[in-house]
Image: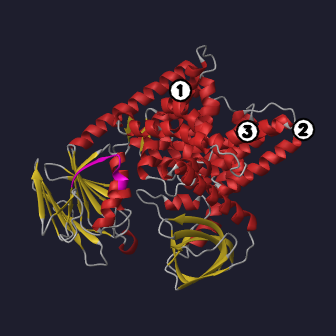
Amino acid sequence: MKRKMIGAAAAYLAGLFFASFFTGIISAVIFLFLVILILAGGIRGKDLVMLLVFFTAAFTVSKVYRHYGYDRIASYSGRTADFSGRIVGIESYAGDFAMYTIEGELDGIEDVRITYFGSTLNAGYGDILNLKGCKFSMHKNDYVFRNKDIFMSENIFLSADYPESVSVEKTHSNKLKNALMDYREDIMSRFRSSMGGKTGNFLGAMIFGEKRGFDPDMRTSLSMSGIGHVMAVSGLHISIIAVMLMTIFSRLRLGRLIPFILMNFLLVLFITMAEWPVSAVRALIMADFVYSAKLFRRQSDTLNSLAGAVLAICIANPFAVYSSGFLMSVTAAFGVGVFGPYMTRNFTGSSIVRSFLIMVCTSLCIFPLTVKYFGETSLISPVTNLILLPLCSAALIIGVFYVMTGGILPVLEIAEYLLHPVIDIMNFISESRIVYFCCCGENTAEIIFALAAAVVVIHVLYNNRAFTALAMAAAFCSAMIFTAVTGKKTYDSFRIAFLGKGKNTAAVVSYKGVTKIFDLSGYYNSPVYVRKYFSENGLSYADIIFLFENEPSQYAAYISELAPLNAGKWYNYDDLYAAGENLISAGEEICFSGDGMEILCRSNALSVKFCGTEITIEPSGNRGAFVVNGDVLTQGILIDKEENSGLNNFEITLSGDGGYEFRRL
């Protein structure tokens, strides 16, 4: 093995994956596959021993880290106690709410990090937050919010809920970070005032990763256009800033060492304002490898730099593998910096066409992960990245220059001029769903990963670019065919999805392109779950939306979340609220029928019949929870996951012969 850094990083990452995710027969099959792949690649002797050592070390470290770290701290879930600690993270939300990350001691365990969500406390970084009589709970994953994985990747294992009292001790200990965050807020305010809310928030999200105030329809347009990565502070941002800084420093003739130190200092300040996303940390380490090679007059290598960054991050934090941002950042860097250039090495056409092919290779590299984590991906991303990314990069450079100079020059108008066509093109693309891939079906992600593994095997066995390209094309076509067949089956099936968090739920009934939404509890986040379900299943139109509770706020929430999707008629149960031409009072009950189905709504209860089979959902009397009953169910399903071990975010598919399929989402 010529470049041992690459093998060591790959083996260490594989060890963390096996320790974290793979169990039972799946683990054995994947491990056997890796062994065969390694032997087929001609790796023998000392290199094989080295791979085994790093794999075993990672596996052991992860298990020990989990036992003495996560398991020990997570065992406090469900207990009530006091907790005090310094504030190390602040995330603000609308309505004067904030989530604080607190680091303190818990029964002798030092440096324990927990989260607390509540009203804004006018507290800064480094201040002491005292929580009296709070109840600890574990973060959980659900259909939309993968909170457990996100917080676990940041070594945050518990949440503090329902404290009897909350107090803050001002320490003024972290003046630098507080000053940086105040400066960020000031810059964000200038962006919005100078460029308008939509464009200003766009630029702020690109520079700082700040998505507060970001329109949901803008987020959808970014995703459908395939350039959502510009909103995550990652390799694109760090490389642009690094190149800009080193170019300026080279003009000043400061030698080699001083520019390197200054670049790192300024990048650390920038990443601090962006709250240290792991993708940016990965990019910073890679930049250090590249520029330190120049410092010592050595040849830099993208793959070695990427491997070194992966190894450094995973050794420092074994739970980094739970971060979707980390995995997608590494995969995208591999695609654009290694795989794409390798596949186009002998290409003799124009540079634009070569850039497009590199974008195609990068999109194919991250395709399995986007389907896994988001259930959807853009098929037009190579084109949009080729056209829109230069405009976004130019606006990013202008924005960073504005931030670094304190806004002394009026350059934001130029950034606004560059971003307007980006937003217009994104909105146009989002209205054409033909360029959008939806992960219909339960096993689509697994099939796509299996196809990706087959491509890797072919590449290792033949080490031929032409064979690899053919294998990738065949795998992609197979994925499209599988999805089309699954999508047609899904389109023709009668499905009821129950979506939401805890005891809050919205029901979505769909059959042959006709979709109806019934928001039963009026929970503010229910439209987010409905939006996710629509995106995953390729749904673009709801002919009826029925609101049972909190009609004014829910109407506004659905209008915002479902854009640019279309909606037909709106109904509300309470005839005291019938504001707007689009909202119709339903009175005591409302019935929909046709195509073999019948739906009856009344007083927070929903009854659905299909070919003689009936499913009902109604209040359980247990603090607003709901119970699902029906002909095909052996017992009622309580939709109240957090309090009563019930279920939410699941789908029931009914067939004409009275059968059904139950699927967790």
How many angstroms separate mark 2 from mark 3 (CA)? 16 Å
Task: Please tell me whether mark 1 sits on a helix, a strand or a loop.
Answer: helix
Task: Please tell me whether mark 3 sits on a helix, a strand or a loop.
Answer: helix
Q: Which mark is residue 255?
A: 2
- Which residue corresponds to the image point at 61% horizontal and 13% vertical from the top-left? 348
Q: Can you tell which of label 3 and label 1 is closer to the viewer?
A: 3
Q: Amino acid at mark 1?
A: Ile
Q: Amino acid at mark 3?
A: Met
Could you say where residue 19 lies in the image, as x and y percent from the top left? 59, 54
Could you say where residue 86 lies in the image, as x and y percent from the top left? 68, 74
Q: Earlier in the sequence, mark 3 or mark 1?
A: 3
In the image: residue 409, left or right of residue 366: right
- Which residue corresponds to the image point at 53% horizontal and 20% vertical from the top-left? 467
Hey, which residue is sitting farthest top in the picture? 348
- Which residue corresponds to the image point at 39% horizontal and 30% vertical from the top-left? 478
Q: Which mark is residue 479?
A: none
* Residue 567 lies in the magenta stretch: yes
Task: Please rate how many residues cluster around mark 3, counting C-alpha atoms within 10 Å: few if below 14, some from 14 to 19, many from 20.
Answer: some
Return the residue at label 1: 458
How many angstroms separate mark 1 from mark 2 (CA)? 47 Å
Q: Amino acid at mark 2?
A: Gly
- Which residue corresponds to the image point at 45% horizontal and 48% vertical from the top-left? 219
Task: Please tell me whether mark 2 sits on a helix, a strand or a loop.
Answer: loop
